[in-house]
């Protein structure tokens, strides 16, 4: 009887956190490739202030990057949403929305302050997406290639840092970053497959966008 009561209590708590359906709960946990019956933190408890500062900085800049990517795709969709390229951009945007949602959860769970420059990234991201989309599909894809290449390289840098520090300790975080990195590489390759390099001034445009991305990464890690 006591065990039955405990099971019933756990079921009630589960329903309280997931009132709509079990499928919604599974969607939250899908990011790590498996279905879990509980929320699982991707971060280990920090050993000291130095480790906490490192992890906070990583999460802050990753959240900022996914936020900016979302705004870029929003700008592209505002211009090209009703064209034949619209569904392709929407698909990539949907994946970025999932990334951002996950980082929102992690920041909230661990009380990590997002970058103070989110209002700037909001405007700058949308403007970049819209302006490059005004160059046509090729311009939008060139922007995608430049941004996603920068983000995937940044994720690779974080993966190397965590692997050198303690891969077993950061197993869940590494899995998360690798999954998101793979999505960014997919978006990069999609852009190349859809004529990104055919836009006039491609290399100049790509270099300028990536310089902005590097500056945004540097600032978001610190502010």
Image (tube, grey):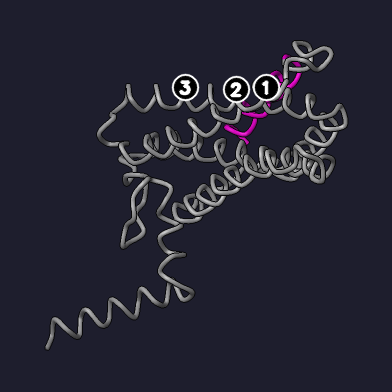
Q: Quadrant of the N terminus?
A: bottom left
Determine the residue located farthest toward the bottom in the rendered image. 1
Above or below 16: residue 116: above
Q: In the image, which disc is placed on residue 149?
A: 2
Select label 3 or label 2 by which is in front. 2
Q: Which callout, 3 or 2, points at the residue further toward the start of the chain?
A: 2
Q: CA distance from mark 2 to mark 1?
A: 5 Å
Residues drawn in magenta: 207-223
Residue 65 against residue 156 in the figure, above or below: below
Q: Identify the residue at horizontal 39%, vertical 24% (top origin).
A: 161
Residue 58 position (above or below residue 2): above
Quote the CA–CA distance across marks 3 and 1. Answer: 17 Å
Specify the label residue 146 is tagged with.
1
Disc 3 residue crowd, few under 14, some 14–19, many 20+, Cα 10 Å: few
- Residue at mark 3: 157
Q: Nearer the viewer, residue 165 or 186?
A: 186
Task: Tell me which residue sits at (57%, 47%) in the image.
Answer: 100
């Amino acid at each position: 009887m006591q065990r039955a009561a405990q099971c019933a209590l756990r079921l009630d708590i589960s329903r309280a956190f997931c009132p709509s359906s079990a499928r919604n709960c599974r969607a939250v946990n899908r990011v790590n490739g498996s279905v879990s019956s509980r929320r699982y933190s991707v971060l280990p408890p920090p050993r000291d202030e130095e480790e906490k500062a490192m992890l906070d900085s990583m999460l802050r800049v990753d959240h900022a990057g996914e936020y900016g990517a979302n705004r870029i795709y929003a700008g592209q969709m505002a211009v090209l949403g009703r064209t034949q390229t619209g569904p392709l951009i929407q698909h990539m945007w949907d994946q970025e929305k999932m990334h951002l949602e996950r980082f929102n959860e992690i920041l909230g769970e661990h009380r990590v302050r997002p970058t103070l420059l989110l209002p700037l990234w909001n405007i700058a991201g949308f403007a970049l997406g819209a302006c490059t989309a005004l160059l046509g599909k090729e311009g939008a894809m060139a922007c995608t290639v430049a941004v996603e290449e920068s983000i995937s390289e940044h994720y690779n840098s974080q993966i190397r840092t965590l692997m050198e520090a303690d891969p077993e300790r950061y197993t869940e975080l590494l899995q998360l970053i690798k999954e998101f990195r793979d999505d960014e590489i997919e978006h990069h390759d999609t852009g190349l497959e859809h004529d990104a390099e055919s836009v006039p001034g491609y290399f100049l445009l790509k270099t300028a966008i990536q310089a902005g991305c590097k500056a945004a990464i540097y600032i978001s890690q610190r502010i």
